[in-house]
Image (spheres, helix red, strand yellow):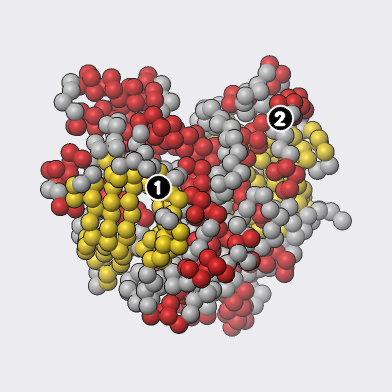
Amino acid sequence: MAPLLEVEHLKKYFRAGGDRQLHAVDDISFTLEAGKTLGVVGESGCGKTTLGRTIVHLIEPTEGTIRFEGEDISNPSKKDLRRLRENMQIIFQDPYSSLDPRMSVSQSIMEPLLLQGKLSKAECREETLKLMKVVGLAEDYENAYPHELDGGRRQRIVVARALALKPKFIVCDEPVSALDVSIQAQILNLMLDLQEERNIAYLFVTHDLSVVKYISDDIMVMYMGHMVEKAPSGLLFENPMHPYTQALLSAIPVPSIHNRKKRIIMQGEITSPINPKPGCRFAARCRYAAPDCAQAQQLEEVERGHFVSCCRCHEIKKAQAYQTN
Amino acid sequence: MGEKILDITGLKVEYHTDGAIIYAVNGVNLSLYKGETLGLVGETGAGKTTIARSIMRILQTPPAKLCGGSINYKGQEILDLSEKEMRRIRGNKIAMIFQDPMTALNPIEKVGFQIAETIAVHNKITKAEAEKRACDMLEMVGIPMERYGEYPHQFSGGMKQRVVIAMALACNPELLLADEPTTALDVTIQAQVLEMIQNLKEKLGTSVILITHDLGVVASCCDSVAVIYGGQVVEYGNLEHIFDHPTHPYTIGLFNSLPKLDSGETRLKPIKGLMPNMKELRPGCHFCERCNDARECCKTLSPETVEISPGHIVKCHFAKKEVESWPHSLKSNI
């Protein structure tokens, strides 16, 4: 059986004035099985949000193919797109701006059901109340407006709205970043419960690495539009191979005072993705950069399911192993 | 421990808005020693920023209203100072790093000038000398001084935050209030900024109050921690007290809400419910509605602060008992 979602050589370039092109997403390929979660991590500006939006066609891809349940959806007609959207939904980062302030909670959740036109108004309302229960919103809030609710409850409305059409795939663009930790845990648990119940696949975009480890089956690390490493969640944290992944993981502040690790402090910041040179885009900040890094990098499967795009990763790993011994 | 430089007792701040009073800070006691870094941890609306703003005396009044308590800075009562006296301290002896570097800088002034201005206001020096020192500050935070004449929009987020830090440190303050200095930044840039604050602290001997909601940040750079909930300090102690022996149910809940990197857990244990509405002052413990161990007395009686071991203070009716009876499930999770 074909996987739920297949993305091949997906590219999204934005025009940046004149003949300058901003390479937001550059040659990304992956597959996602039903009911699984792919986490996408990277710094701001690395293209992770653009990737999510391109897949659900909020932005049209420049090049590449997207297949959903085996069907090519790279260039859907308007009619096809409507049908597709029943199966693909998106949850945005900011529950404060992704809800219409003039629509009540039930109106927001009901809108996709009404637009779909399969249910009568009474049935829609019934369904809405069911959805509110599923996401843990009390019925009393049916007629409340977003401004009356706090961030956690608003994000629950957004989740309910995304679930309304029973999608098979949801792009979650930093769904918990705007929330406090205690509320964040509530929403993450809700999303995992829903995944189990309804076999939904998530593309989970975030910059929070501890969240991504908790929720994902596979993790993809992006740097300036490129996929630099992809591996099953546990493997990536146990055995990060790309120097960028290593630095990124070492930078996470760990809430423990016993296993303090040495932080790798990267010099500089993400550089401009406008008309980038071929070769490794991380080279400018990389401690291990060598002349070879100016060549285009190949994605190599270093162990089962673990892909790395760095020509020196074996050398680096050996050197690091030598250092620790 | 060195000299005590800041002593806050019984601080109370309210916000008076249309027809409603929000009780933001309800009797906070804190003290800070020279060279120490104190972490203030808590959720949005817990009152962390209000505490910092009270120390700087930059609360907007109205709507804010200081209703009591004292803030003693090196023997001086800050709340009694005149605005003129306060201006001599603010930005000079006590400086603040604001949360959002995008809005903390003036978009129409050169970044170098914004640093030099602080220096010129507090020191009797010429313009050229102030500029020279501003350049040094830029270099210190890792920005080449050729960029003195550039505007904030030409800088990235991480660099803007470094400019804000340079501005705060320009007069070698004795007390630095850092209000979520890295929340708006990526982890890699956060690591750079935290490393820098740490280095500067060691070099200049500054005391720091670091406001954050990230326990990871606290673990990596604080000496002591105050956990704030509902405008009160619910637990206070050194790093070891808080991270190895968290005792208040809220502190334990916070740790359990965090996804951990080194365990294969499948479900988080969030704190149930939401932050209480601070529009009414409840008689009992502010956390009781969300607490799994709440009993009758929690609803009616405000808990006393108990010192369960030297320097480790907990505001909970059952703090003493918890220490004895909590090495079970909750603790093993931490």
At x 74%, y 26%, the residue is A322
Query: What residue would you read off at disc 1?
Result: B38
Q: How far is disc 1 from disc 2 in space, using C-alphas?
A: 34 Å
Image quadrant where one finds the C terminus of chain B: bottom right
Whether tag 1 and tag 2 are in contact, CB under 8 A, the answer is no
Q: Is residue B202 above or below residue B221?
A: above
* Residue A254 drawn at (x, y percent): 57, 46
* Residue A168 drawn at (x, y percent): 72, 62
Q: Is residue A155 above or below residue B299?
A: above
Furthest residue to the front? B310
Asked if badges 1 and 2 are on one and the same chain, I answer: no
What amino acid is at disc 2? Answer: Thr
Label 1 element class: strand
Q: Can residue A105 be seen in this view?
A: no
Query: What residue would you read off at disc 2?
Result: A324
**Mark drawn on residue B188:** none
